[in-house]
Image (spheres, grey):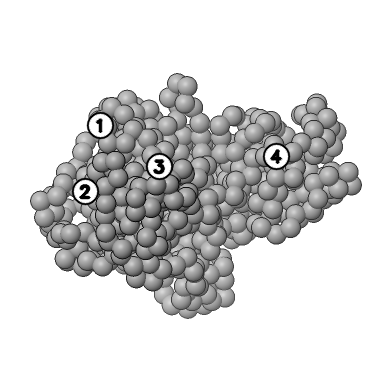
Amino acid sequence: MCGSEAQWSPRLGRGGPRPDPQTGKFESRSRLLGRTGGAALLIAALGACERSPSEGGTEVPEAEQQPTDGAVGLARATPAPGSVEEGERRAGPPEPRHVRLDGSSEPLAVNHVSTGPRVYAKNLRVWVHERPDGSSRRLGYLRVGASSPTSESAAGFAGCQGGWYPVEPAGYVCVGRQATLDGTDPVVRAMETFRPRPEEKLPYLYGTVRNPGPVFQRLPGIEELREAEPDVDRRMLEWLDAGGEIGASYAQDVWTWGEPPEDPRGAWTAKLTRGVPDFLQNHGMVPNPHLSPRPPTLVLDRMRPKVGYAILDTFLHEGRRYGLTTHAELVPTDRLRPIRGSDFRGVRIGEDVEFPFAFVRHPEAKFVDASGADAGAATYRDVLRLTGKQKFFGKVLHYEVKDGRYISDRHASRLDPAKKMPGWANAGEKWIDINITKQTLMLYEGTTPVYATLVSTGEAGLASAETTTATRRGIFRIHTKHITATMASNESGEEFELRDVPYVQYFESEGYALHGAYWHDRFGMPKSRGCINLSPEDARRVFHWTDPQVPTGWHGALLPLRGTVVFIHP
């Protein structure tokens, strides 16, 4: 699995015992092995590198096994019977946007009407079941604040006292502790306006803990603040005066979605308050989207080192900027290092570039001329148009660039279309080709390559994935997708937690996934603990291109055996 990108350690992740999501007891985990055109597809549950203890008391299920007829075909869940009648309904959240491979996005064709029943998620994860029965297959889930049109009456009550209500485009949710029909519910009212932003390279604002301090569940007054943080006045002045990435001059526009922020020094001096949400005014508490109750205290928790927070929005209160996290907590942003995320992105084949071409994958790559002499530095991650000619200098293969210079295959990755197309390609399926040696990913629509980029696979390279941090090789299918998911590790010496890792796509039974990495910018070099790291922008584009598609308003979707093919090879 992803090793330190997972909560469970590698020793528990590889066929070892796993806790049952309902009882917490350990039991063995089976592997489902299906064969399609002679290729072994390892398909199973939500990956180990997704679950976090802070998911609000919601279970992470084993993915239900599904029969297969052996065909290599894409499929979507069939809409369940009893779906909502057409008619007027209450207006929903802002229109979602479809993301293309060029990075542009457009509103989807969704009908928003004014009145009618809706069902609202008030927990971090509200499962959508295929039928109005808790024992039926899970199709995906809604996140707190999301809602869907529904019916006037429940479709059934099997295992759900409040009743099962349909959601669009398919499935049912249980109304009760985790979902409600009441649009005025305080958790719903507080959280429904804070949705992921698919038009941005990162769906939320992100920061990593730089200087641990208290986590609040309401905004403190100045005296309460000094009691909770006795050194706050001195520490704020030190932060305001500091330079570089540890000071107030670094990347503060991250907290305002790229808009010019208020001057931190001026805001602190004037004790400025601006943009505080209504539910936090007058000593209001943050809503609790968890099943477990919270104590009615000012300080909820304390930040831990090596934690990355995802922030829904920020605001000024008595001179200090606070962020509302995705888990409904308040954190002072001066204790975080704001994260911009890499600006690197791949290219559209046939639009931005033609074969043959290469990515410069080494930061210290150099060109040589026709005699082998130094011909200058190459720009890291630049795209080079090649002539197709190759030459050896000092027993090292070099590619000829169209300007006549050469670059080593140890410093650049040449991309060409597959020489022999697999059966799923000839059948017209979308598929992903990942080359570990070259650190490249290429998207195909059938036999046509459409997109290419650099990735970071497991830092152990081509070693055994059973005993190291190497990425597992083989043929798989994407079975579970999350717009964001928390990844963490409790392995001794490597403990950390990364909240809401963006655009997570699990393809293997023991927690291997494609996902965005906001914490590094070394794409083209092995870097991960086994997962496949993409730049935030590449992760966004690839996520919206692959199957299963995450329905409008949902936060995750499951489709064992029928998602996009992932082929990982040396």
Question: Which residue is label 2 attached to?
Answer: 475
Tell me which amino acid carries mark 3: Met
Residues at badges 3 and 2 in contact (C-beta under 8 Å)?
no
Kindly tell me whether residue 81 is visible in this rendering. yes
Q: Position of residue 296 (x, y in %)?
A: 69, 35
Q: Residue at x 77, y 29 (%)?
A: 229
Q: Residue furthest left?
A: 38
What distance separates the C-alpha of mark 1 from that of mark 3?
A: 18 Å
Amino acid tagged 2: Ile
> Neighbour class for label 3 at 10 Å: few (<14), some, many (≥20)?
many
- Judging depth in this view, the residue of 420 and 336 nearest the camera is 420
Q: Residue at x 68, y 48 (%)?
A: 251
Residue at 39% x, 71% y: name it: 351
User: Which dot marks residue 464?
Assistant: 1
Q: SS of the residue at dot 2?
A: strand
Alpha carbons under labels 3 and 2: distance apart: 22 Å
CA separation in Å, label 1 and label 4? 40 Å
